[in-house]
Image (cartoon, grey):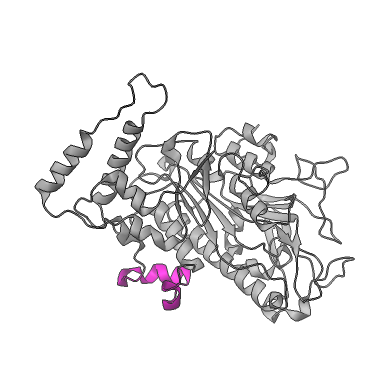
Amino acid sequence: MKILSLDRRSLLRGAGLGLGLLLLGPRRGRDAAAAVDDMPHRFVSVYFAGAWDVLLGADTRDPGRTYGAINLGTTRLAPEFRDPIPVQLRGRETLYGAAMAPVVRHADVTTLFRGINMNTVAHPTGRSYVNSFLSPRGSTVRGDSIGTTVAAISPSDDLVLPNVSIGLSSSNVSHGSEVNALTLRRATEITSVLRAERPIQDPQLAAALAAAQDASASCISDRYPAPRPNDQLAASRQQMRRLLADDTSAAFDFRRADMAALRERFGITQAGLANPNDVGVSAAVASQLLRAGLSRTVTVMLDTRLDTHGAEWADQQPLRQRRGWEVLAALLDELREDDPSMSHTTVMAHSEFARTPGINGRGGRDHWFANSMVVFGKALAGGVFGATTVDNLGLAAVDLETGRPAAGGTVLLPEHVGATVVAALGGDASPFRVQPIHSLITGSP
């Protein structure tokens, strides 16, 4: 398995030098004159770290009723989080928890999966599961990361960073190196990746160094059947030279005066600018990577600190979860400026698992396996698919055509979501070893 973690030093080592830097405007996306129909598909996987409480968000209950094994804890919540929100998804009314209020405006492009069996309540295992949407080996990612899988559907050599993963490792076991992910521990590292450490000022010296690099040879025979390291190095070098030909790092300098509108949209404060884990900064970096044309596939972890086992659950879980949904809604707002109908954009949101229906002795909720996931975009038909049992937030078997509870039905797995999204984007869903849900795929027979 190739676990990839390309940092700034290794990228610049492959490039060898920095060329003159030209400004890339922070809001430059596709050519405004280009038709939306010509837009290549963009994909974002958004990971809410720590295990979200679906009763406060994606799988809530009516507080006016009582449920056998569910304690909504409503009276302990701030008034703004007590009442769920009725939302129409594909003509069917459902309830969002109040923390999800920011994404109500994107209900027209929303597919909500409920009752997904994560088969784990261990953070590392759950995190690996939603990395690839394949059941992990222990806590190790199995197969290709979902970003790598999607990037490989329509690989393109016109992208400098075709696949970027922020906060999560990335694996590639099935595809060529052209879709390897650039992995960043934190979103703010993108600026140092895109900026030459010591750009060479003398053009003649820069040209001589470039020529010397290009003349380097490998000891690997021309008859070697696999990709030759020297060829891969040359491609990496050319890619990095293209990257440094523009001052692409300027697109991520959120302190600039002309970034005020972006800071406002993502709720980035001065304190947030100084915080390398700020969720607004992370989401804004993901947006800029796509809108500046550097990437088409981005995975981003929102460090929303959702692992609330104690009394902090009542105060911090709803606030942190809502902040995550706020920046996700802002990301969708940004991407819909280029693609209003989301016909060429898919964004999926998930956490490693959920939280228990009951409140523990410390006043919080523990880990729970019955999860929800949300997919935005017209690649899927929209609506609610799957369910949990009403009284105890348990797993419900469902009909794989309708998504409604059914005797003899199937309990959803992350593989069903991964296979469906990948198939909808034109990829090979066979690695997931389940059938895609064809009723959700737009245009599927």
**What residue lies at 41% left-to-right and 63% top-to-bottom?**
188
Report the side of 161 relative to 428 (left or right). left
**What residue lies at 29% left-to-right and 30% top-to-bottom?**
218
Q: Position of residue 366 (x, y in %)?
A: 75, 66
Q: Is residue 258 magenta?
A: yes
Q: Is residue 324 above or below residue 440?
A: below
Q: Position of residue 109 (x, y in %)?
A: 59, 52
- Looking at the rendered structure, the number of numbered marks drawn on it comes to 0
Quarter containing the C terminus: top right
Q: Is residue 278 above or below residue 243?
A: below
Q: Position of residue 113 (x, y in %)?
A: 70, 51
**What residue lies at 45% left-to-right and 59% top-to-bottom?**
334
Q: Position of residue 245 (x, y in %)?
A: 24, 49
Report the side of 381 relative to 20 (left or right). right
Q: Which stretch appears magenta?
A: 255-275
In this rendered view, identify the residue nearer to me: 228 or 54. 228
| Predominant SS along the magenta part | helix
Q: Where, by quadrant of the figure, is residue 230 drawn?
A: top left
In this rendered view, identify the residue nearer to me: 262 or 439. 262
Report the side of 143 relative to 275 (left or right). right
